[in-house]
Image: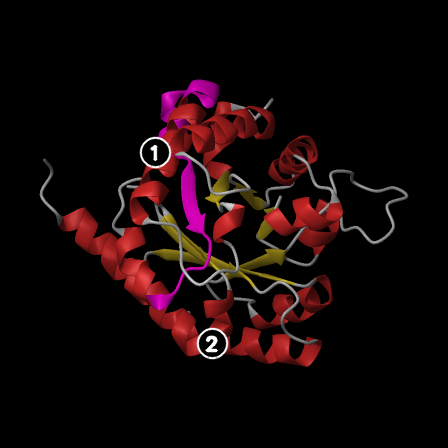
Amino acid sequence: MRKLAVGTNIKMYLGYQQTASWMIGIAAALSDIPHVETFVFVPAPSLVDAQRIFSGMPTGYGAQNMHWAASGPYTGELSAEMLVELGCTHVELGHAERRQYFGDTDETVNLKLKRALASQLRAVVCLGEVDRCTPAAARAHLGDQLGRLLDGIPPHQAAGFMLAYEPRWAIGVDATAPADHVQEMHAYIRTVAGCLLGHDAADKLRIIYGGSIGPCDVSTLCSLPDVDGLFIGRSALDVGQFRQMVMDAGNARIARRDQPQQ
């Protein structure tokens, strides 16, 4: 069974000192939860603090974006090499807000993914349909998107990154996407990945769900057979709540594993 992963992106919700305090709380809160890979994405100015706070701790950390070039005249950007120097373990690529406000495309995210893999950073690559639509339309969008995102990615690197299914219509709203829709899209993503990378590689690829996840959604989502974890948003700003959600995710995975096979 693929290892469960639970992470968060705190976006630009907290100030610099608030972020430092939040990271200290998170490092302590997630220090003793086994069998779950945890990670956080924080604003660039907080990465130096993250290196100090998460040193020796099980929770990974990283940037909310990076450039595909090793260096160059790219004002305001971060390179993978900079992130590695700062001890980052993860990097987030292609979030819906990066696409909406800053012009990220599947093609540029593909370039960033290749650079991340070459630098041994575990990328969390976001994808998903923009508008709520029929399942057939959502599958068509995801199939096209995966073809561009995974272009030129070797099958042996499938275990080195995650896909985060985040339909834009489910981000920042009051309720997560329906569980049956989440499972259907995750299963379809894995099927398409199998066609692009090979079925063995697709079986190793972790696909996590993000989009307005609340505490009451965790157990249901983590019980779905093709959901390998969660990418939690604003609910993670409450340290105690985030810890409980990680624990609930782990317990749901254990319960799923212990269910008799049909």
Q: Nearer the viewer, residue 73 or 87?
A: 73
Location of the N terminus by quadrant is top left
**Quick one: 125 or 69, which is closer to the camera?**
125
> Dot 1 surroundings within 10 Å: few (below 14), some, or many (20 or more)?
some
- Residue 214: in magenta span: yes
Task: Give the tally of numbered discs.
Answer: 2
Residue at 11% over, 38% down = 261
Residue drawn at x 34%, y 33% as measured from the top left: 187
Dividing the picture into quadrants, the one containing residue 13 is: bottom right
Residue 82: x, y in percent?
Answer: 74, 52
Relative to 151, does residue 89 appear above or below in the rendering? below
Q: Please give the name of the residue rendered at 59% of the width and 80% of the height, measured from the top-left corner.
A: 21
Quarter of the figure with residue 212: bottom left
Quick check: is 56 in the magenta stretch?
no
Q: Position of residue 8 (x, y in %)?
A: 51, 60
Would residue 79 appear left or right of 218 to someone viewing this image? Answer: right
In the image, residue 75 lies at what x, y percent? 87, 50
Secondary structure of the residue carrying numbered label 1: helix
* Mark sitting on residue 187: 1
Q: Distance between the residues labelled 1 and 2?
A: 31 Å
**Which amino acid type is shown beneath numbered disc 1?**
Ala
Q: Which residue is drawn at 83% across and 42% down?
A: 71
Visible in this render: residue 54? yes
Q: Give the range drawn in magenta.
A: 195-215
Q: In this view, does 60 lie to the left or right of 248?
A: right
The reply to whether residue 32 is in sight is no
Disc 1 + disc 2, Cβ < 8 Å: no
State the residue position of label 2: 238
Relative to 6, does residue 51 appear above or below in the rendering? below
